[in-house]
Image: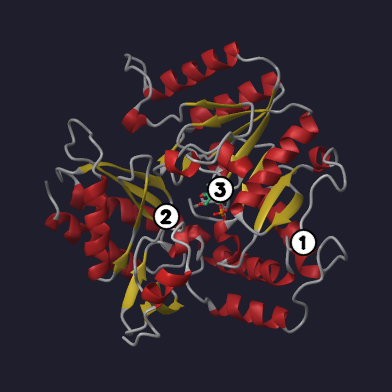
């Protein structure tokens, strides 16, 4: 590798160390489920750029849509004029979401989508308190950071957070925040939530939740819990915000995770897989609620950029072709993992939904002590064997698998076989 191609070494002197890196790979290109480095080594990418490259790398239809739009209109600002891709995408998202969630405010990133969701909830209710959940991740700007608790590191050193945020334990069954009782975990979680709601006043604007904790460890909340949260929010006059930045756009086998639960949020935030890697986020609500978010109260220069919107429209068309198959692929992945990792002394839990799969690694399955070090070793060894995976979790001890949704059965099986063989080498 030439000095010029050693991006990691060159980056050391010019890129801020504040951005952490999972690997030091020097990537030249991407195609489908693979990233290719400067030495022409291909890596099966089970990270999809952290659940973003949902259609794989450089899907030809997405590339074509971007090229076509780049020749037509790059930017005019959605706050200055109206243009087709922006409105067409809003119409499309509304039809996919259903339930009158048809009014869109576009942003450039996930954190800005969540800022918009939070600002909107405060503005339209005239209240400022927010209920968030432990282990949640909603972004790194000061508003979304204030409702984030997945890692102390994200918050430490930044001074006071937004006032009025309360955290309630996320229903994390493997690491239950509540004493065990003869009742089922779901029953306990719901009754704890009900008891908590009895203690709070009417001054909460909203509750914000990821239906599956992403950064916090790929932990799904049950339908029972989400339904109870919906009911309690309505009773208290609070809005319910779903952060579907990671779970949305087909990742869990339905267009949006809330479709699995029959729980309808008032506001939803999307980003990541929406535009196959072009920067786009969106805050969506009902026209009735959005009408109360008065014109000019929020805005932005780049949100809903024509190229990003065209990339999103092409992404949706590609995903439409593979959505019906996600549950089957998911079943295949979970079956292979459960069959081959069952009984491994360091595999504590395998969980998730669709192609959002977490493997929680522990020092001992009885004590459940997290093993973040083994996760690091597994990531390194997997990369050496051509498989890219990254970690998550409040203790950094969960491997998260989020391959492109277009992944073939053979690629999926190949990646899982590598992962299982690496697990076989790593036992404590
Ligand atoms: C659930 C969730 N919300 C918000 C964000 C923030 O998105 P972004 O990194 O685009 O700001 C992320 C990013 O990982 C996320 O997973």
Q: Position of residue 21 (x, y in %)?
A: 39, 61
Kindly identify which numbered label has been placed on residue 301.
1
Can the viewer see residue 128 in this picture? yes
- 271 versus 413 height, above or below: above
Can the viewer see residue 35 in this picture? no
Q: In the picture provided, is 20 more to the left or to the right than 370?
A: right
Q: Of helix, strand and loop, which one carries label 1?
A: loop
The residue at the point 48 percent across, 21 percent down is 190
The residue at the point 48 percent across, 16 percent down is 191
> Which residue is identified by label 2?
355
Q: Nearer the viewer, mark 1 or mark 2?
A: 1
Q: In the picture provided, is 352 more to the left or to the right than 55?
A: left
Mark closer to the chain start, 2 or 3: 3
- 389 versus 192 height, above or below: below
Q: Of helix, strand and loop, which one carries label 2?
A: loop
Mark closer to the chain start, 1 or 2: 1
Q: Quadrant of residue 198?
A: top right
Q: In the picture provided, is 292 more to the left or to the right than 366?
A: right
Q: Position of residue 69 (x, y in %)?
A: 72, 78
- 23 versus 171 height, above or below: below
> Which residue is identified by label 3?
140
Q: Of helix, strand and loop, which one carries label 3?
A: loop
Q: Nearer the viewer, mark 2 or mark 3?
A: 3
- Note whether ligand 1 is within 8 Å of mark 3: yes
Figure quadrant of the N terminus: bottom left
C-alpha gap between disc 1 and disc 3: 20 Å
């Amino acid at each position: 590798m030439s000095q010029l191609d050693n991006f990691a070494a060159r980056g050391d002197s010019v890129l801020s160390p504040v951005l952490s890196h999972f690997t030091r790979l020097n990537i030249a290109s991407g195609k489908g489920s693979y990233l290719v480095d400067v030495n022409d080594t291909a890596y099966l990418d089970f990270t999809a750029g952290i659940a973003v490259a949902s259609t794989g790398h450089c899907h030809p239809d997405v590339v074509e849509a971007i090229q076509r739009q780049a020749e037509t209109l790059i930017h005019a600002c959605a706050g200055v004029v109206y243009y087709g891709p922006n409105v067409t995408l809003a119409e499309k998202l509304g039809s996919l979401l259903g339930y009158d969630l048809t009014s869109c405010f576009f942003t450039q990133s996930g954190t800005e989508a969540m800022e918009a969701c939070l600002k909107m909830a405060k503005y339209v209710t005239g209240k400022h308190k927010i209920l968030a959940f432990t282990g949640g991740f909603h972004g790194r700007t000061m508003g979304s950071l204030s409702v984030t608790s997945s890692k102390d590191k994200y918050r430490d050193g930044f001074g006071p957070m937004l006032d009025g945020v309360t955290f309630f334990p996320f229903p994390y069954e493997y690491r239950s925040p509540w004493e065990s009782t003869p009742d089922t975990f779901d029953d306990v979680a719901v009754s704890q939530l009900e008891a908590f709601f009895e203690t709070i006043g009417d001054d909460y604007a909203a509750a914000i939740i990821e239906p599956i904790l992403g950064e916090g460890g790929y932990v799904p909340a049950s339908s029972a819990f989400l339904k109870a949260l919906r009911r309690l929010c309505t009773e208290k006059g609070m809005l319910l915000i779903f952060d579907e930045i990671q779970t949305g756009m087909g990742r869990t086998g339905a267009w949006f995770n809330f479709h699995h639960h029959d729980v309808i949020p008032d506001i939803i935030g999307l980003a990541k897989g929406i535009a196959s890697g072009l920067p786009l986020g969106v805050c969506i609500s009902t026209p009735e609620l959005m009408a109360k978010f008065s014109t000019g109260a929020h805005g932005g220069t780049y949100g809903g950029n024509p190229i990003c919107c065209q990339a999103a429209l092409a992404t949706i068309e590609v995903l439409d072709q593979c959505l019906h198959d996600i549950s089957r692929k998911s079943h295949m992945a979970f079956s292979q993992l459960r069959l081959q990792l069952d009984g491994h002394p360091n595999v504590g839990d395998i969980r998730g939904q669709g192609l959002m799969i977490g493997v929680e690694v522990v020092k001992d399955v009885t004590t459940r002590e997290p093993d973040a070090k083994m996760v690091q070793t597994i990531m390194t060894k997997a990369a050496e064997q051509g498989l890219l995976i990254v970690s998550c979790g409040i203790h950094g001890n969960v491997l998260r698998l989020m391959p492109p949704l277009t992944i073939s059965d053979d690629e999926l099986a190949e990646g899982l076989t590598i992962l299982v063989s690496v697990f076989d080498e790593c036992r404590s």
